[in-house]
């Protein structure tokens, strides 16, 4: 098997050392995932504090996720060239400083800008952490278990974000959503310096600057159209021009990548149906999760009059479902392959979305809590098999790139979910808010059904053993 160590590789780590490295990487990934969703429940408080409307609030979430998605792969390439631990620690530092800037933001524009810088730092953590874990785990079975843990922690962080956010907003105000990152970053910096070994790729890839630029333009304009389209009008000159730019950038990206020796996204990976299915599944799962979280935020606080803490607590069944099922999913992947947990994930997500397609202002909270539990269970089952399907059948040398593409797909799904859900409720009064969310719950159910595609392409336990 091809390895990703330097020619002068450090001595092999002990079992304790390998799992310590995993724990440090999981701590950073928990932070990245948490900041993707922790802000959602605090959006109304941010809006009141900074005088911002719904669309500006959408940008406080999507500025982070779009930048994170757009830079993930290039950050992974930089880490392969200059050292994974070095880039990882640089990302922690950027993320920490940007978090402090978010907490001190005097206006919504400053907050959006600081969130974008946060996304830069986060992009230096996600794929790099996975590459560090893969490099530290030479045994395929141990690596599969580690990937399962890594993916489960990331999924769990996304699920517990609303509960954590509600408690922070209620106790300390919305700025505490960002202050809280400082001690976690400090701890991760100390631990990474002590326990994470340096590693580089034996033959690092060249940076694909044309591909990077085209990907960033395509993502930013595409998400921007979804957020701003309802305000400026879908057929307005501005929206039409943005759609054309997004389409041209997407087409240009495909053309450039197919002709480069070392592309940002290797088109050959997409020849594998399992990998392509995993990428589509990652987008679908995170569209479903972020649609749920944004619709919940506005429905529960504006239509039902709940406080931020109460709204965050209402998502607790989602966190519980993800907490219980994420590690279970990792074990199922190791024992039976990726197909069974993906089927469970799709079924539970679809059931949760269907529970709320008739939502109104008087819907029973019991039904809402049940839907949250089902969606949380589906989300918990999804992440480990998606990551395993994407990287499990590849040599270690390509695992970092495949993991980065999958992480990009997750964050793109998060950005799309926020943009689509925000478009449904922006400018809608409390009396019509529940009705306005109904297409969003159909979208969540549809995302669950879409997981049947990666489930069909995923390896079964029998195929894994061959």
Image (cartoon, grey):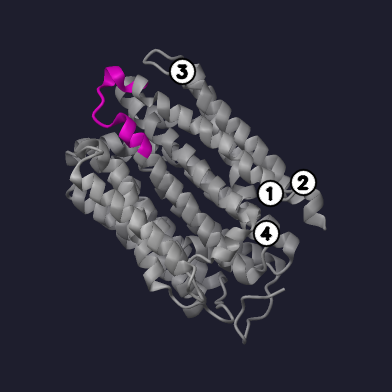
Q: Mark 3 Cα within 10 Å, few/some/many (few <14, many 20+)? A: few
Q: Mark 1 Cα within 10 Å, few/some/many (few <14, many 20+)? A: many
> Magenta stretch: dominant SS?
helix
* Position of the C terminus by quadrant: bottom right
Secondary structure category for the residue under label 1: loop
Separation of marks 2 and 3 at Cα, in angstroms: 36 Å
Separation of marks 3 and 1 at Cα, in angstroms: 36 Å
Residue in the image at 64% along x and 48% along y: 385
Q: Mark 4 Cα within 10 Å, few/some/many (few <14, many 20+)? A: many
The residue carrying mark 3 is 365
Residue 450 is situated, as x and y percent measured from the top left of the image, at 57, 38
The residue carrying mark 2 is 336
Q: Mark 1 or mark 2: which is in front?
A: 1
Secondary structure category for the residue under label 2: helix
* Vertical arrangement, residue 433 with respect to residue 187, above or below: above
Point out the stretch of residues depicted in magenta. 420-434
Residue in the image at 50% along x and 65% along y: 265
């Amino acid at each position: 098997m091809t390895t990703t160590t330097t020619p002068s590789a450090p001595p092999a780590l002990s079992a304790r050392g390998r799992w310590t490295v995993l724990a440090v990487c999981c701590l950073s990934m928990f932070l990245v995932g948490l900041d993707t969703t922790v802000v959602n429940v605090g959006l109304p408080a941010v809006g009141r504090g900074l005088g911002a409307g719904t669309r500006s609030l959408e940008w406080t979430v999507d500025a982070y996720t779009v930048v994170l998605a757009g830079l993930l792969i290039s950050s992974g390439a930089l880490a392969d060239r200059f050292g994974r631990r070095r880039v990882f620690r640089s990302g922690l530092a950027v993320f920490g400083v940007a978090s402090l800037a978010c907490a001190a933001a005097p206006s919504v524009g400053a907050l959006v800008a600081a969130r974008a810088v946060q996304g830069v730092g986060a992009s230096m953590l996600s794929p790099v952490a996975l590459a560090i874990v893969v490099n530290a785990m030479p045994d395929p079975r141990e690596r599969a278990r580690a990937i399962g843990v890594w993916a489960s922690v990331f999924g769990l962080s996304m699920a517990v974000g609303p509960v954590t956010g509600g408690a922070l907003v209620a106790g300390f105000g919305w700025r505490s959503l960002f202050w809280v990152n400082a001690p976690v970053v400090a701890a991760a910096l100390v631990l990474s310096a002590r326990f994470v070994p340096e590693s580089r790729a034996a033959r690092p890839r060249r940076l694909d600057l044309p591909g990077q630029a085209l990907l960033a333009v395509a993502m930013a304009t595409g998400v921007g159209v979804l957020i701003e389209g309802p305000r400026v009008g879908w057929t307005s000159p501005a929206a039409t021009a943005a759609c054309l730019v997004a389409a041209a950038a997407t087409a240009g990206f495909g053309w450039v990548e197919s002709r480069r020796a070392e592309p940002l996204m290797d088109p050959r990976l997409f020849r594998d149906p399992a990998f392509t299915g995993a990428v589509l599944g990652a987008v679908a799962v995170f569209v479903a999760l972020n649609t749920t979280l944004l619709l919940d935020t506005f429905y529960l606080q504006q239509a039902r009059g709940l406080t931020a803490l109460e709204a965050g607590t209402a998502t607790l069944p989602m966190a519980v479902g993800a907490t219980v099922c994420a590690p279970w999913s990792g074990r199922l992947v190791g024992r039976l392959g990726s197909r069974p947990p993906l089927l469970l994930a799709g079924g539970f997500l679809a059931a949760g979305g269907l529970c709320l397609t008739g939502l109104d202002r008087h819907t029973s909270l019991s039904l809402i809590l049940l839907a949250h539990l089902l969606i949380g269970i589906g989300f918990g089952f999804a992440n480990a098999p998606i990551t395993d399907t994407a990287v499990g059948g590849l040599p270690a040398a390509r695992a970092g790139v495949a993991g980065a593409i999958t992480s990009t797909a997750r964050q793109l799904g998060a950005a799309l979910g926020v943009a689509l859900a925000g478009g449904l409720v922006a400018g809608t009064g409390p009396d019509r808010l529940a009705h306005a969310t109904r297409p969003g719950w159909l979208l969540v159910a549809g995302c669950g059904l879409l997981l049947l595609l990666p489930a069909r392409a995923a390896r079964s336990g029998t195929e894994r053993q061959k």
